[in-house]
Image (cartoon, rainbow, N blue to C red):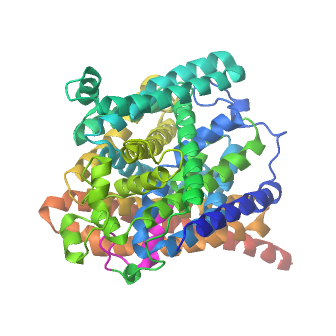
């Protein structure tokens, strides 16, 4: 099948969803009002509560929510064929993901920028808030570990990509100081400086890598940026710590804003590339693996396709950003519509383009890259274009599991087909390394935002024990951040020692992340009822029912079929216990919160009737 009809259909559905459904949510369900002061206006502190222009905050929010999920999930789910993933991405993002993000953002703004756990405490009960806090912290650690591991996997021994990714940090700090001092007038020149300098860094990396072995620029890159897995992991941990502790305007927001130019620009170019090149989709609409037994994902289409795609359609992690950094920076309530709902639609479009890029690879090449060499040998397939691709890209591709490498190859093939660049020397190699760097920027922005949100939650919990533990002092922030980084850092190192590390962490992330979406939609439903908006409950209850069915079944199957089996093997026992306890904890907390919300809803419905019949 040609990719053009799929891309046009996706763009049309997303545009209609934003124009009409988000307008309905904004006007009727949430009743956004610019006359109501936002948390950034009520308590500006120059650290976390900073009123931020709409499009800068859009860039930060989009960069923070769009991590490895919409990039890697659709690629891995392509094992089931392109049709299931495409339908779930398009329908899910309009009816579930966009609603989830938008409603939670509005709820947090109305609660003074407080976290999801604190909203649950107010709208349900202190016990529900405590359960939500425990579940959220577990999910945050698991999510950031999976994202950090994806960065390590894609950046190890890649000096070009690591250099470009590292260059975004000083560039962002320069932009942050520039905009801080110059105000809104400085946004345009600072943005132009950041984008042009970032493109120069990409060009410098490619130029230096192409030089002879003894050339000084190439030696510089290889000495400082060609790092092994542990070196990349340490660098990512150091960055996560700094991004969480430093003022939000200095590193986190400008870096996310800078990376959003690259992200949105690349996605726009990829959409244009798909429309122009309109590659043929080599993958079938439905593969034989929908019944299970696949070489990448062993489970059946339901529920594992929806768990694997995860963030591209709906993501519980987004509720932590929508009730973490973003509501503290919203300048006016109407900005919540493009930032909360619009950014999620953009993420859905990212997922669709990545699915198309993966489906454009021949199935034999797709499995040769994404399955281990032992598993691929058992499939009886012969690679078609793999050896040619390896020669043109300049790196080995066989057995590079995890989805990131096959996505980079698919993206590079689409870009290399554009008429303006198709005759450029080494064009496929440039686009491949650009795509690897592009993926790394996507993922790293989730690492920094997730670490900062976890720090907020630890400080909120500490503040209930002693006021000084919940304050904004840098020492308290550093201690809380150190604890968070140590937790997800251990998981990354443990996964590096396991050849199945990416698969273990990704399934773990998918289940935990979607369980968090169930919690967020439950809290959102309670908030709507308490606000007198019970007639609009189907907006949140319909996606809640579907996601709950998917995740509870997926969690039970994952524990029984995979994680408990790891516990029985001495070499994987520690990781298996962590996975089993992590998923089990989140499932129990989620079930308890849903049950508490259901009891409260039934009680509230019964009370008026009882009052009416009283003598």
Is residue 469 left or right of 8 when viewed as pictured? Answer: left
Q: Nearer the viewer, residue 279 or 239?
A: 279
Q: Return the x and y of residue 221 as percentages of the image width and height.
A: 29, 28
Q: Is residue 34 above or below residue 307?
A: above
Is residue 67 left or right of 184 when viewed as pictured? Answer: left
Q: Return the x and y of residue 38 as percentages of the image width and height.
A: 73, 37
| Image point (52%, 49%), residue name | 66
Q: Does the image show residue 315? A: no
- Residue 405 magenta-highlighted: no
Residue occupying the far left of the picture: 570
Q: Return the x and y of residue 29 as percentages of the image width and height.
A: 78, 59
Residue occupying the far front of the picture: 423
| Image point (23%, 25%), residue name | 219
| Image point (68%, 74%), residue name | 602
Is residue 420 left or right of 490 when viewed as pictured? Answer: right
Q: Is residue 551 above or below residue 106?
A: below
Q: Nearer the viewer, residue 417 or 176?
A: 417
Number of numbered discs on residues: 0
Q: Is residue 30 above or below residue 36?
A: below
Magenta residues (range): 293-310
Q: Does the image show residue 555? A: yes
Q: Nearer the viewer, residue 374 or 391?
A: 391
Q: Return the x and y of residue 39 as percentages of the image width and height.
A: 69, 36
Q: Quadrant of the C terminus?
A: bottom right
The image quadrant that residue 301 belongs to is bottom left
Is residue 529 left or right of 353 when viewed as pictured? Answer: right
């Amino acid at each position: 099948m040609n990719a053009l009809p799929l891309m046009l259909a996706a763009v049309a559905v997303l545009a209609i969803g934003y124009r009409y459904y988000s307008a309905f949510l904004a006007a009727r369900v949430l009743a956004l009002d610019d006359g109501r002061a936002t948390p950034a206006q009520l308590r500006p502190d120059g650290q976390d509560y900073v009123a931020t222009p709409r499009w800068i905050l859009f860039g930060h929010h989009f960069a923070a929510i769009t991590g490895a999920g919409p990039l890697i999930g659709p690629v891995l789910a392509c094992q089931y064929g392109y049709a299931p993933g495409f339908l779930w991405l398009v329908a899910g993002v309009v009816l579930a993901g966009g609603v989830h993000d938008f409603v939670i953002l509005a709820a947090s703004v109305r609660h003074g920028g407080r976290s999801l756990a604190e909203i649950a405490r107010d709208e349900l009960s202190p016990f529900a808030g405590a359960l939500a806090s425990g579940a959220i912290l577990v999910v945050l650690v698991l999510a950031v570990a999976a994202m950090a591991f994806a960065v390590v996997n894609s950046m190890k021994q890649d000096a070009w990509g690591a250099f470009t990714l590292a260059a975004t940090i000083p560039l962002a700090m320069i932009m942050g100081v520039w905009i801080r001092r110059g105000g809104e007038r400085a946004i345009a020149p600072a943005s132009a400086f950041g984008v042009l300098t970032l493109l120069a860094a990409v060009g410098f990396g490619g130029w230096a890598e192409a030089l002879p072995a003894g050339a000084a620029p190439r030696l510089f890159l290889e000495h400082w940026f060609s790092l092994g897995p542990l070196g990349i992991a340490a660098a990512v941990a150091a960055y996560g710590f700094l991004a969480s502790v430093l003022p939000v305007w200095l590193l986190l927001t400008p870096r996310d804003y800078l990376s959003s130019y690259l992200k949105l620009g690349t996605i726009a170019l990829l959409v244009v590339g798909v429309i122009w090149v309109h590659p043929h989709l080599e993958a079938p609409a439905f593969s034989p693996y929908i019944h299970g037994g696949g070489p990448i994902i062993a489970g059946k289409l339901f529920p594992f396709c929806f768990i694997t795609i995860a963030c591209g359609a709906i993501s519980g992690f987004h509720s932590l950003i929508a009730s973490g950094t973003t509501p503290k920076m919203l300048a006016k309530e109407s900005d919540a519509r493009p930032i909360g709902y619009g950014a999620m639609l953009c993420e859905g479009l990212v997922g669709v383009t990545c699915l198309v890029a993966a489906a454009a690879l021949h199935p034999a090449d797709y499995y040769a890259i994404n399955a281990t060499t032992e598993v691929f040998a058992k499939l009886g397939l012969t690679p078609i274009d793999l050896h040619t691709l390896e020669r043109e890209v300049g790196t080995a591709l066989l057995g590079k599991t995890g989805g990131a490498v096959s996505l980079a190859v698919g993206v590079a093939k689409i870009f290399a087909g554009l008429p303006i660049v198709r005759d450029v020397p080494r064009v496929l190699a440039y686009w491949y390394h650009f795509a690897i760097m592009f993926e790394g920027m996507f993922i790293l922005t989730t690492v920094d935002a997730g670490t900062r949100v976890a720090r907020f939650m630890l400080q909120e919990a500490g503040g209930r024990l002693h006021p000084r533990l919940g304050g904004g002092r840098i020492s308290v922030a550093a201690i809380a951040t150190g604890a968070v980084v140590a937790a997800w850092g251990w998981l990354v190192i443990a996964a590096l020692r396991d050849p199945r590390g990416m698969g273990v962490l990704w399934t773990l992330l998918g289940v935990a992340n979607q369980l968090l979406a169930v919690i967020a939609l439950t809290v959102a439903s309670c908030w709507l009822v308490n606000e007198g908006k019970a007639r609009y409950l189907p907006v949140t209850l319909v996606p809640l029912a579907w996601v709950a069915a998917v995740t509870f079944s997926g969690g039970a199957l994952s524990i029984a079929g995979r994680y408990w089996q790891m516990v029985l093997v001495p070499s994987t026992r520690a990781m298996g216990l962590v996975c089993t306890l992590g998923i089990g904890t989140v499932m129990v907390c989620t079930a308890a919160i849903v049950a508490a919300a259901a009891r409260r809803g039934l009680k509230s419905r019964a009370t008026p009737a009882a009052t009416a019949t009283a003598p």
